[in-house]
Image (tube, grey):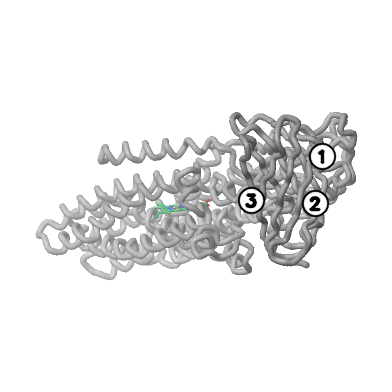
Amino acid sequence: MNRSILILCAALALVALVPGNASAHATYVSSTPKPDSIFPYNATPTSVSITLSEAVESGAGTIHVTNATGTRFDVPPVTPSGAGRTMTIGVNRTGSGIITVTWTAVSAVDGHFTAGSFAWCVQNPDRNGTGCSGAGLGATSSGAPVSPFEVGLRFIAFFGLAAALGASVLGAFMWIPAGRDPDVKETPGYRLGFQVVTNVGRIGAFGFALAYAGLFLLTDALESSGGSSSVVGSPYKLSVILSLGVGAVLFVVLSNAFTRARKDPPESTHRYLLLGALLGFAAIAIGSAGTHAAAVQSLGGISSYFGIDPLAPLNAIAPAIGTLADAAHIAGVALWVGGLVTILAARSFLREPTSVPLARIVLGRFSAMAFYCVGLVLIGGLVLALLLVGSWDALFSSGYGWVVLAKVSLFIPMIAFGAYNRYRLIPRAAETGEPAAAFRQLTWNVRNETAIGATVLVLAAILASLTPAVSVFAGSTEFTLNDTVSGIHIQMIIDPPPASANISYTVQFLLTWASNGSAYNFGKNTSVITFQSETNPLPPQTLPLDGPHGNHFFITTLAMSQPGTWRIQPRFVRSDGFDLITTFHVPLTGGS
Ligand code: HEM
C-alpha cells in the first residue's frame, strides 16, 4: 500500500474526529421569547416557542416554565410546528422575576435525546425593587457528544451496504456476462473468483444488518414510553428498523448465492444477485428517507445563492430534493466503493495470466460504471453540501464544514486513481503484450482507491452523526440595531422582528459603555421615545420610556400603525451629562 496514501487517510480521519466531540442531534437554534429577554410586568409572554436544529419525534418534546420557587406556568400540550422543528406551549401570566424554561426532545432525525434551558426576566413593577439586569446565561442545550460507537456502526453500515450492492452488481452485470466468453468460462479464476465475489456480498450484507441492529439498540425505541408511536413518529427510527429488515433478507439472499456458487456454475446464482442488487437499492432508498438531507426545511445555500426567500413555498420541495440527492450520492458511493472492495478481494484471480480475458471484461465494465458513479457522487454530494452546509462561511468555520472539506479532499485522489486506471492501464492492457502486468498495477491502484474510499466512509459516518451546519447557522432572527453616541453604545431590540404595521411591538434599549461594554446606569426616568412615519403624513408620537431598570429601557406600543419607513428616536435623559439622542429607521411592509 502506498505509504503517503495511508498517512493522508489517517491524517484526514484524525482532523475529522475533532468536530466529532461537538454535541449532535436536535440542538437549540432560537426561541420566542429569546434568552435573557426582559418583559414589562404587564406584558408577560403567553407562550413559548423553541426551534431546534432537527425535527422532534412526535410526542417526545417537553417544555416546563417555572419561576424561582419552582411554580409551573406552562399549559400543556406541547404543539409541534415548522415541520416538527419548533415546539410551542402556552404560558400563564407570571409575576416578576426570573422565569426559567427547561426543555427536552428526542430527535426524529437521529433518535437522540437533548435537553436545554434558558430564562427571561419580568420587570419588578416597583422601580425601587430588584429589577432585571439584562445580563443572562443565554440558552443551553446539551446532548450526548457524538459516540465513536455510533460512528463505527454507521461506518460498518455504509461499508457493508457498499460491499453487498457492489458485489451483487459486479457479479450479475460484469462477472457472469464475462463467462459468455468461452476463453473465460474455462479459466479456474472464473468460478473460484466468483465464489469470492458472492462471499464479499454476503459478508457485506451481514455487516449491514448487524450495524443496523446496533443502531436500533442505540435509539430509545425499546425503552421509550412511546413504544410503536415513537417509531412511527420518527423517520429515523422507522428507517433503522426497515433497514434492519432489508439487511437480514439481503444476507439470506446473498448467502444463498454464495452456497450455490460453491457447487454450481456462477450463472445459476444470477437471479439471487439481481435480487441482492434490488434489495441493496431498496436499502439505499429507505436509508435516505431517515437522513439529515430528508429533514431539510429550506433549499439552504441554493436559496441564498438564488435569493429565494427562506419562507418561499418553493422550499417545500427541499426534503424531496435532499432525499433524492442523498440516494443518488450513496448509490454512486456503494456501487463504486463496493465494486472496488469486490475487485480487491478477488484480485488474486484477476491477476492470473490465464484470467486476462476475465479481467479485461470485468475491470473494463467496472471502470465504465465507475465513471457514472463518480458523477452521481459529485452531483449528489454538491447538492447535499448546498442543502446541509449552506454557505462558504459555514463550510470553513463549522466542524461539519471541515468534515465535508476533508471528504472533498480525499475524493480528488480517489478520482485520480480511477482515471489513471480507466485512461492509462485499461487501454495499456488492451494494447500491450503484457496485459497481466497492467492488471497487476491496476489492482494495486484499486487497493489505494479502496483505502481512501473506506476513509471517506468514516468521514461520512461522522458527518451523518453531526448536526448539519445549515441548522446551527440558521440561528435566531433577533432584530437589533446599534449606535454609539458620546461613548455610550445604544442597542435597540424590537420584538417581534418588525414586519407588519399596526401590531404591538416591544422596543427595548440596552445602554453600555462603548469602551468596555459594562452597563451604563445613569439614565433617568424622564427619558422618552418619538415615533415618526417617513412615508405617511402622520403626526410624530412622543411616549415615555419605561425605565431605567439598571441600563434597560423599554416600551410596548402600537405606535407604528402604518406600513412604510419609521424613524425611531429615543432621548435618554442622563444624570451625568447631556441627553443622549439617536435615530433608527425601521421599514414595515404589510398590515395597516
Ligand atoms: C464532492 C465530494 C463530496 C461531497 C461534497 C460530499 C458531501 C456529503 C454530504 C453533505 C453528506 C450528508 C451528510 C449528512 O447526512 O449530514 C454526505 C453523505 C455521505 N457521503 Fe459524501 N460527499 C462527497 C464525496 C463522497 C465520497 C467520495 C464518498 C465515499 C467514497 C461519500 C460517502 C458519503 C456517504 C456514505 C454519506 C452518507 C449518506 C447517508 O447518510 O445516507 N461522499 N456527503
> Does residue 116 appear in the picture of this structure?
no
Question: Which is nearer the N-term, disc 1 or disc 2?
Answer: 1
Q: Quadrant of residue 37?
A: top right
Residue 120: mark in rendering: none
Name the residue tied to disc 2. Answer: 542
Give the quarter of the figure containing the N terminus.
Answer: top left
Question: Which is nearer the N-term, disc 1 or disc 3?
Answer: 3
How many residues crowd around disc 3 within 10 Å: few (fewer than 14), some, or many (20 or more)?
many
Residue positioned 77% across, 64% down in the render: 538
Give the quarter of the figure containing the C terminus.
Answer: bottom right
Q: Tell me which amino acid carries mark 1.
A: Thr
Q: Is residue 37 above or below residue 90?
A: above
Mark 1 falls on what kind of element?
loop
The residues tagged by marks 1 and 3 sit, at their Cα atoms, a distance apart of 46 Å
Name the residue tied to disc 3. Answer: 54
Q: Tell me which amino acid carries mark 3.
A: Glu
Mark 2 falls on what kind of element?
strand
The residues tagged by marks 2 and 3 sit, at their Cα atoms, a distance apart of 44 Å
Q: Going by the image, does 572 lie left or right of 4? A: right
Name the residue tied to disc 1. Answer: 526
Residue positioned 15% across, 60% down in the render: 428
Q: Going by the image, does 282 lie left or right of 53? A: left
Given residues 383 and 49, the one toward you in this image is: 49
Mark 3 falls on what kind of element?
loop
